[in-house]
Amino acid sequence: MNKKPIAMGYARKDGGKGIRNKVLLINTTSCADEVSRRITEHYHQLGFPVDYMGCECCENDEDLYRSDLCYVNHQNVGAVLAVGMGCEPFPTAKLAEAAREAGKPGAVLFIRDAGGTEKAVEEGIRIVDGMLEELKHTPRVPVYLSDLSFGAECGGSDFTSGLAANPLVGRFYDRVVKAGGTAMFEEIYEAVGLRDYLLSRCANDLAKQQMAETYDRMFAGAKAAGQFSISPGNMRGGLTSVEEKSMGATAKSGTMPIEGVITAGHKPPHKGLWCMFGPTYFRCFGTGGDATAGTTFGSCGAHITFLTSGRGHITNNVLSVLVKITGNARTYQTLQDDVDVNASVVLTGEKTLDELEEDMYGLVCRIADGELTKGERSGHYEW
């Protein structure tokens, strides 16, 4: 167990700890997107921790509601403003109630009741100003590595991903689990050919059964569709087969025992290394693709999500702090204002994997203590 705190975080009513203390706006109909966006951008210009997540629909959907509750209850969220039009069937007010039940400031803004777009933006700013003032009084508590939960996703993999970026995450995951923390990986559809290997790492018979069922379901679905998870971009990046991609992708899970399989929207029942596979009820709207990784892992409680990419990513997430890693020196040179970790130094011999993992541990400690990632500093807020 890691007995030394790595940061000072924010105490939550349920005993959890956040590494961010932001106000989250959740618009419950696409009609409210413009108001939420304008309120958020007002605070981004001022440098305050305010973000929004949106719904590209107008419906009363139990699955959507349960997903929104994951956002409300995320440890990095300190207050919630639910924004609706006022005529949508969605139970918007319940999100504010859920926030208050969790010990967080919660409020509702209906655009029709406020008098339209401009007045709603003004009213929203007034409400958020009050929330930010309340958040100044959130108790600060020591955060240990064992308090934190992590997610990891590949995106735009190339030949360097399995040689540098993903092994770096795997090495860090081993550290997290040994310290008593929680680590999650996914992309079983990028584990083709590795069934026996994954089963050999399962911590118990139940975990082995869950992993076998998950792998078999994935494989059957991919075979029926005639499409396994390798893209033209992967091949242009030097990957020759889905099996080669799978071995590199699985490296980010590290070497520790796998405790079992969870689905999106569910936190792991206890600490350790977990496989996360696809949604049961989870609904995620917005950018789509790799950009949703932080939202998906955030729904499972991840404080931080690692996004590895040989081809490069510029995205960020409003729930789980996104740390972008590349093993491609050219990609890092091109996107160094967006990518947080240059893992190519392992391939050039400038650093060993052990040395780079120690550097990343230091970066995680600083991020947990409030240092902004490059995505946060640039103002990205995809979900």
Image (cartoon, rainbow, N blue to C red):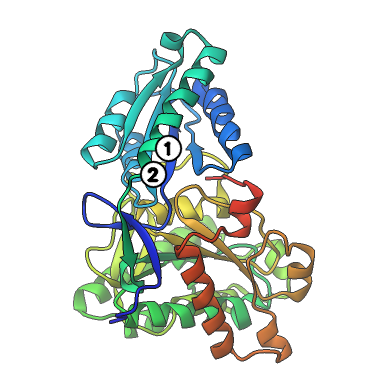
On the image, numbered disc 2 is attached to which residue? 136
Task: Between residue 42 and residue 27, name the one nearer to us.
Answer: 42
Query: Does residue 342 appear in this view?
Result: yes
Specify the amino acid type for callout 1: Leu
User: Who's the residue at 39% across and 51% down the image?
Assistant: 76
Give, as a three-letter code, the residue at label 2: Lys
Mark 1 neighbour class, 10 Å CA radius: few under 14, some 14 to 19, many 20 or more:
some
- The percent position of residue 183, horizontal first and vertical second, equals 38, 70
The numbered mark at residue 155 is none
Badge 2 vs badge 1, beta-carbon distance below 8 Å:
yes
Q: Quadrant of residue 140?
A: bottom left
Instruction: Left or right? Give the position of 214 relative to 124.
Output: left
Residue at the image position 56 percent from the left and 80 percent from the top: 359
In the image shown, does 221 or 139 lie closer to the viewer?
A: 139
Residue 378: x and y in percent read 66, 50
Q: 237 above or below 134? A: below
- Residue 145 higher or lower than 196, as above or below: above
Residue at screen point 54% across, 76% down: 360
User: Helix, strand or loop at disc 1?
Assistant: helix
Residue 332 lies in what quarter of the image? bottom right
Q: Which mark is residue 132?
A: 1
Q: Residues within 10 Å of mark 2 (few under 14, many from 20)?
A: few
Residue 61 in view here: no
The percent coordinates of residue 175 (x first, y second) are 40, 82
* Structural distance between the alpha carbons of marks 2 and 1: 7 Å
Residue under the image location 53 percent in, 42 percent down: 48
Percent coordinates x, y for residue 242 in the rendering: 59, 72
